Image (spheres, grey):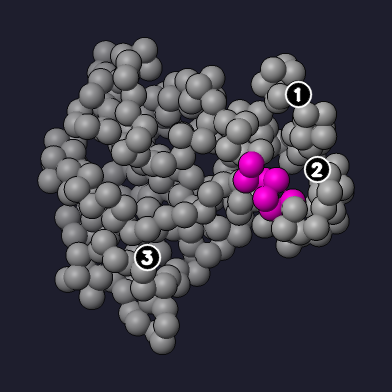
């Protein structure tokens, strides 16, 4: 790990090295200015004057470590986030795949589950869910646990079409529970995108509003890994601020705005 990657602050540099040694998470592959600011706020909120002291405390306090993961992984999500892009997926991208009734789909960095459940609702509406598989992965075990619980506050549902919300959510006091039938089509799994090997043969990979937090080098590595995980003709769906300007270098081509198809050889 080179010093220019982790800055000139020895306290923060030591924190990055310690985190990687003990957890395998390489904070140097995230944009330093954003990450350091976010973690400094968390450290000070918890009363630690240095990152060294904060690290020692985290290693002895599971709740504090979970709070670190939550802050690091930016667990902010909503159902149907950027609704027009989901409509493009439903009306243009999926039909072009000519699905036979079985799709292999991956929601990468799924956070608290809104994205894979949105995928499950769309596949269900298109009568594709029962024969398909959806992998939902995230680094944060706490976020995955909340995703598996399937309880959400009303504001998370603000972009869900009303008739779809009525079919797939049950109101339980102040929260809404997702339909258990959707859960059956989703496999939740802990995964570090930067270090873990990926499954292959995916028809669709959705990774939205995550790449913006990585360095250019890390993004380059991840786009290669995603492309290798798609079947020929499979599609990568990215966030609205994550346009790939030279998809050909990854063996991809633009299918629609923010949708990239793996070139068939």
Q: Relative to residue 10, is residue 127 drawn left or right?
A: left
For the point 27% across and 49% down, which residue is it?
82
**Secondary structure of the magenta portion, mostly?**
helix
* Badge number at residue 41: none
Distance between mark 1 and mark 3 Cα atoms = 40 Å
Where, by quadrant of the figure, is residue 127 drawn?
bottom left
Foreground pick, 118 / 173? 173
* Badge number at residue 156: 3
In magenta, the rendered stretch is 37-43
Q: Position of residue 47 (x, y in %)?
A: 80, 58
For the point 72% across and 58% down, which residue is it?
45
Neighbours of disc 3 within 10 Å: few (<14), some (14-19), many (20+):
some
| Residue 196 appears in the figure | no
For the point 69% across and 17% down, which residue is it?
4
| Residue 44 appears in the figure | yes
Q: Position of residue 115 (x, y in %)?
A: 37, 53
């Amino acid at each position: 790990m080179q010093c220019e990657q982790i800055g000139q602050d020895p306290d923060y540099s030591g924190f990055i090295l310690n985190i990687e040694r003990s957890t395998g998470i390489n904070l140097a592959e995230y944009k330093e200015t954003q990450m350091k600011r976010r973690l400094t706020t968390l450290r000070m909120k918890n009363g630690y004057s240095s990152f060294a002291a904060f690290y020692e405390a985290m290693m002895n306090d599971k709740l504090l470590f979970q709070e670190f993961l939550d802050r690091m992984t930016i667990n902010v999500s909503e159902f149907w986030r950027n609704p027009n892009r989901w409509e493009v997926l439903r009306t243009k991208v999926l039909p072009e795949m000519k699905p036979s009734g079985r799709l292999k789909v991956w929601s990468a960095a799924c956070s608290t589950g809104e994205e894979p459940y949105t995928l499950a609702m769309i596949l269900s509406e298109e009568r594709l869910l029962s024969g398909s598989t959806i992998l939902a992965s995230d680094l944060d075990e706490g976020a995955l646990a909340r995703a598996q619980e399937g309880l959400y506050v009303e504001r998370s549902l603000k972009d869900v079409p009303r008739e779809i919300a009525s079919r797939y959510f049950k109101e339980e006091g102040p929260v809404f529970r997702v339909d258990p039938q959707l859960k059956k089509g989703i496999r939740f799994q802990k995964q570090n995108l930067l270090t873990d090997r990926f499954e292959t043969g995916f028809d669709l990979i959705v990774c939205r509003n995550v790449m913006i937090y990585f360095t250019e080098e890390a993004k380059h590595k991840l786009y290669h890994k995603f492309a290798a995980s798609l079947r020929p003709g499979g599609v990568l769906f990215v966030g609205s601020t994550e346009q790939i300007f030279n998809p050909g270098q990854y063996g991809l081509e633009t299918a629609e705005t923010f949708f990239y198809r793996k070139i068939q050889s």
